Amino acid sequence: FFFVYKFFMQTENMENLEFSSKTSYSVYISISAIKGLQDVMKKNLGPKGTFKILVSGSGEIKITKSGSLLLKEMQIQNPIALLIAKTISAQNFFSGDGTTSIVLLLGELFRNIEKYLEKNIHPQILCEGINIGKNELETWLNSKVIIPKKKKTKSY
């Protein structure tokens, strides 16, 4: 319920925006949906994160702080937010952690993208900048990888 409420509150504020020919209303709707996901998830992060109470249609109650479970149980309508939720759930399956952190990072990324879209910067230029940043991050991360030395085995 909170996610739906936040989403509609953000879309009501968008009625006053003037859209350039380069961006469309649907882009801003998707960004609002992602920011709504971020708003729901950011209160879960860390040891002082709050628990969420999930109530199913049949009345089953779950109390959780797990970002992965929240993404699975939320009824997300926006296709972009749904794609992000499913991708993050798949990532969680392989690594076992990081769901909430990734949602928070993506939310901030899209908040910044929205600022540049409002300045009429073309989305293709933003995508190229994101790819450059991704490549730089991969290079930096690869330089920080520590490869453990093999232990010498004793022969008897």
Image (spheres, helix red, strand yellow):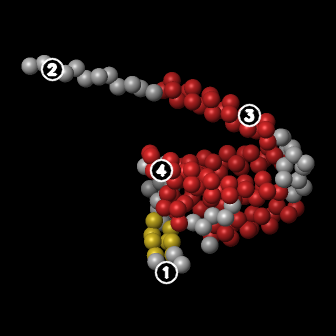
Between the residue at mark 2 and the residue at mark 3, the CA separation in whole angstroms equals 53 Å
Q: Is residue 148 above or below residue 1?
A: above
The quarter of the rendered structure image containing the C terminus is: top left
For label 3, the SS is helix
Residue type at mark 2 is Lys
Residue type at mark 1 is Gly
Disc 4 target residue: 92
Q: Which mark is residue 154?
A: 2
For label 1, the SS is loop
**Image spot of residue 121 (x, y percent):** 84, 40
* Outermost residue toward the bottom in this view: 59
Between the residue at mark 3 and the residue at mark 1, the CA separation in whole angstroms equals 47 Å
For label 4, the SS is helix
Between the residue at mark 4 and the residue at mark 3, the CA separation in whole angstroms equals 27 Å
Mark closer to the chain start, 2 or 1: 1
Tell me which corner region of the image, top left, top right, bottom left or bottom right, holds residue 129. Answer: top right
Q: Is residue 49 visible?
A: no
Residue plotted at (73% across, 38% down): 127
Q: Which mark is residue 128?
A: 3
Disc 1 target residue: 59
Between the residue at mark 2 and the residue at mark 1, the CA separation in whole angstroms equals 61 Å
Residue type at mark 3 is Glu
Q: Which mark is residue 84?
A: none
Mark closer to the chain start, 2 or 4: 4
Residue plotted at (81% across, 64% down): 13
Mark closer to the chain start, 1 or 4: 1
Residue type at mark 4 is Asn
Left/right placement of residue 92 relative to residue 23 reads left
Between the residue at mark 1 and the residue at mark 4, the CA separation in whole angstroms equals 27 Å
